[in-house]
Image (spheres, grey):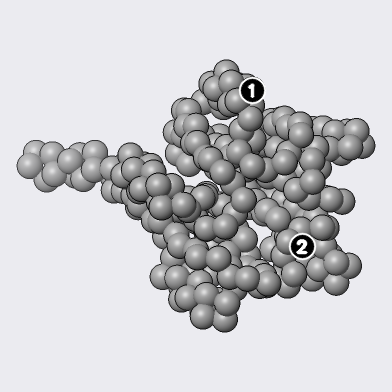
């Protein structure tokens, strides 16, 4: 009986241990052009509608979206020059692709893609942040890398990537402020930190971090100037939010949100 009770105790602890491995990441920079920022966090996607519409009316625009277990997080910024914005979500990747293409035919550019609890989400906008954006969906990592190589040669730049549900969804655009661009795939966070330090030493800055398919995918660019940049990594969401507020007061602004498990 004692042995059985001990095993039940271990099983009870397993979800807690698994949850404890998860962490939140934010990349912050100075000189982004964003004058103000807020974060909206809700457990369900549908609960974002009311606060986002309110923020839009106040002049904020979505500049990043992230999903982690039991939480959707949105970063909204002022000073973007985005004239009009919306977000859509679909469960089937085919429906998602079709809807994105329909909006792009109406003159919208796609700026963010995210997957969570079976929902594919895209942020679309009209303004001058990106031009000639495109979305490519593929099944294999090797194919994704081949697309990145091909589109980069055509003058496109990576602006976002999402690996989920057996798909790689890659966003490209022209007329970004990224002059040169490289990317790396790391097996774990420790390896990723070494890659980041190496790029910082070369004067590069982070475009995006993404965890998916059990790997970290990171994108870097070299600009005409290298603004101050840092990242925050926290296991507790409340501490994570408090750390962000601290850096907001120092003039930093979030340029990317991510979450991972290793």
Picture disc at residue 47: none
Q: Does residue 217 appear in this view? A: no
What's the residue at 24%, 39% (across, down)?
A: 12
Task: Please name the residue that numbered disc 1 is placed on.
Answer: 57
Percent coordinates x, y for residue 66 in the rendering: 55, 42
Is 105 placed above or below 142 here?
above
Percent coordinates x, y for residue 34 in the rendering: 59, 46
Task: Please name the residue that numbered disc 2 is placed on.
Answer: 157
What's the residue at 72%, 41% (across, down)?
A: 81
Percent coordinates x, y for residue 199 in the rendering: 55, 76
Would you call the spot at circle 2 few (<14 residues within 10 Å), some (14-19), or many (20 or more)? many
| Residue that extends furthest to the top in the rendered view of this protein | 50
Q: Report the front residue among 238 and 20.
A: 238
Q: Secondary structure at mark 2?
A: strand
Indicate left or right for 209 with 91 as reference: left
| Residue that extends furthest to the left in the rendered view of this protein | 2
Nearer to us of marks 2 and 1 is 1
Indicate left or right for 92 with 260 as reference: right
**Residue 52 sits in quarter:** top right
What's the residue at 58%, 21% (across, down)?
A: 54
Q: Secondary structure at mark 1?
A: helix
Q: Does residue 117 appear in this view? A: yes
What's the residue at 85%, 72% (across, down)?
A: 153
2 and 1 marks in contact (CB < 8 Å) = no
From the image, which quarter does the N terminus lie in?
A: top left
- Closer to the N terminus: mark 2 or mark 1? 1
């Amino acid at each position: 009986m004692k042995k059985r009770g001990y095993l039940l105790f271990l099983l009870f602890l397993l979800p807690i241990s698994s949850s404890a491995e998860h962490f939140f990441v934010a990349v912050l920079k100075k000189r982004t052009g964003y004058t103000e920022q807020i974060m909206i966090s809700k457990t369900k996607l549908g609960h974002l509608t009311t606060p986002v519409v309110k923020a839009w009316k106040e002049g904020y625009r979505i500049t990043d979206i992230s999903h982690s277990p039991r939480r959707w997080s949105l970063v909204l910024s002022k000073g973007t020059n985005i004239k009009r914005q919306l977000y859509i979500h679909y469960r089937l990747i085919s429906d998602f692709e079709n809807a994105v293409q329909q909006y792009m035919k109406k003159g919208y550019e796609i700026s963010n893609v995210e997957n969570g609890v079976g929902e594919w989400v895209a942020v679309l906008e009209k303004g001058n942040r990106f031009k000639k954006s495109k979305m490519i969906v593929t099944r294999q990592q090797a194919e994704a890398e081949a697309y990145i190589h091909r589109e980069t040669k055509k003058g496109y730049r990576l602006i976002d990537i999402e690996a989920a549900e057996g798909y790689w969804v890659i966003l490209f655009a022209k007329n970004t402020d990224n002059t040169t661009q490289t990317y790396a795939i790391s097996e774990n966070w420790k390896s990723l930190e070494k890659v980041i330090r190496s790029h910082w030493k070369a004067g590069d800055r982070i475009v995006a971090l993404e965890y998916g398919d059990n790997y970290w995918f990171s994108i870097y660019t070299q600009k005409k100037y290298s603004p101050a940049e840092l990242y925050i990594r926290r296991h507790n969401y409340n501490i994570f939010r408090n750390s962000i507020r601290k850096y907001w007061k120092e003039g930093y602004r979030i340029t990317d949100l991510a979450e991972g498990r290793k």
